[in-house]
Image (tube, grey):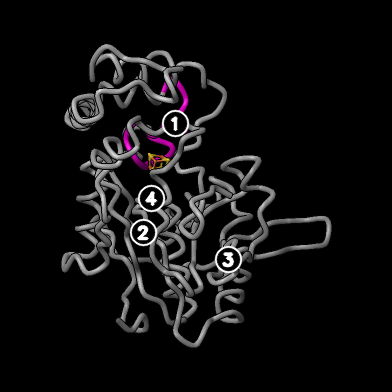
């Protein structure tokens, strides 16, 4: 698909705007983050075009619009994780009604839970590599990750290579704040997922183990069908594996017991940060950067 044919995202609530400035005063003078981002995209455009990672979140809406404004070649890819909020899926479909950006996973989250004998945890994070970060090997991947999202992300360079050095990443809005992102969306009248209007600050996989306690509680109430999906996956995992995990160091009496442990005990320890989708690009060696 030739990215040059991609059109600006259209907000059903109004026309797409054309404002392209995000001025910031620094010690070294005035900078325009939008102009900088567009220049960066143009300067580093690969001959085959960018592989644009489109999650459907606010940051991906911005990088899509920047790529259109820069006039660079790109193709869009949305990795379906099978545990995204239905509102997010509907939003992506509303933008791309042909569904031509959808990348289906080899395994669903439920299958991964059975395969790995345990739901994903921060220290057992098999799912991002399989569900979120696959695809684009050997390409230049355009992402919407930002330094503000976590100390780990703040340390990442704007350009980087995968561990096997085959895939490049350009984090074009790495230095943008959340305020910058929203200002750009509003100034340009870009569409965004309705969950943000409900107070969601980040949107990604429901019950992601990188969420904090409050977000976990919110997901339990807000997305009962996906909660039930996880519960059934735990039951299946217990039924298939009839097992204890980690050489007997963790045992469950049933699939429901596994699910409750996952929600209440194991996850409850993590309350410090809310970092949905923190793992990044580990498809090559299964490790998490
Ligand atoms: S965002 Fe969270 S739940 Fe989704 S694939 Fe990554 S670690 Fe797993």
Q: CA distance from mark 2 to mark 3?
A: 36 Å
- Is residue 146 placed above or below 218 in the rendered structure? below
Judged from the image, the secondary structure of the residue bearing numbered disc 1 is loop
Q: Earlier in the sequence, mark 1 or mark 4?
A: 4
Give the image location of residue 28, x and y in percent: 83, 61
CA separation in Å, label 2 and label 1: 34 Å
Q: Which mark is residue 57?
A: 4
Q: Does residue 107 appear to the left or right of 127 in the view shown?
A: left
Circle 3 residue:
164
**Among numbered discs 3 and 4, the one appearing first in the sequence:** 4
Q: Which residue is mark 1?
A: 121
Q: Nearer the viewer, mark 4 or mark 2?
A: 4
The answer to whether 254 is drawn above or below residue 193 in the figure is above
- Judged by depth in the image, the label closer to the viewer, 2 or 3, is 3
Which residues are drawn in magenta?
200-214
Residue 95: percent from left, percent from top: 24, 62
Q: Gap in Å between the C-alphas at discs 1 and 4?
A: 22 Å
Q: Provide the secondary structure element on which disc 2 rests.
A: loop
């Amino acid at each position: 698909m030739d990215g040059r044919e991609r059109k600006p995202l259209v907000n059903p609530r109004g026309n797409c705007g054309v404002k392209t400035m995000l001025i910031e005063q620094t010690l070294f003078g005035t900078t325009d983050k939008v102009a900088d981002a567009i220049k960066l995209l143009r300067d580093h455009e690969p001959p085959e075009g960018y592989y644009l990672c489109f999650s459907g979140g606010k940051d991906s809406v911005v990088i899509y619009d920047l790529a259109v404004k820069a006039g660079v070649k790109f193709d869009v890819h949305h990795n379906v994780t099978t545990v995204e909020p239905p509102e997010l899926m509907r939003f992506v479909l509303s933008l791309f009604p042909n569904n031509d950006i959808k990348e289906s996973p080899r395994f669903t989250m439920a299958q991964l839970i059975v395969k790995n004998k345990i739901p994903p945890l921060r220290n057992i994070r098999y799912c991002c590599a399989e569900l979120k970060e696959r695809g684009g090997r050997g390409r230049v991947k355009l992402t919407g990750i930002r330094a503000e999202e976590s100390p780990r992300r703040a340390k990442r360079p704007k350009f980087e290579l995968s561990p096997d050095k085959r895939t490049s990443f350009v984090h074009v809005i790495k230095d943008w704040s959340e305020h910058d992102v929203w200002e750009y969306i509003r100034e340009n009248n870009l569409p965004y997922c309705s969950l943000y209007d409900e107070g969601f600050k980040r949107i990604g996989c429901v019950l992601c183990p990188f969420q904090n306690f409050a977000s976990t509680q919110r997901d339990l109430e807000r997305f009962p069908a996906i909660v039930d999906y996880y519960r059934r996956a735990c039951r299946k995992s217990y039924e298939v594996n009839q097992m204890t995990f980690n050489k007997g160091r963790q045992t469950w009496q049933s699939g429901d017991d596994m699910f409750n442990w996952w929600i209440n005990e194991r996850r409850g320890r993590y309350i410090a940060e809310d970092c949905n989708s923190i793992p990044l690009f580990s498809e090559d060696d299964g490790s998490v950067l």
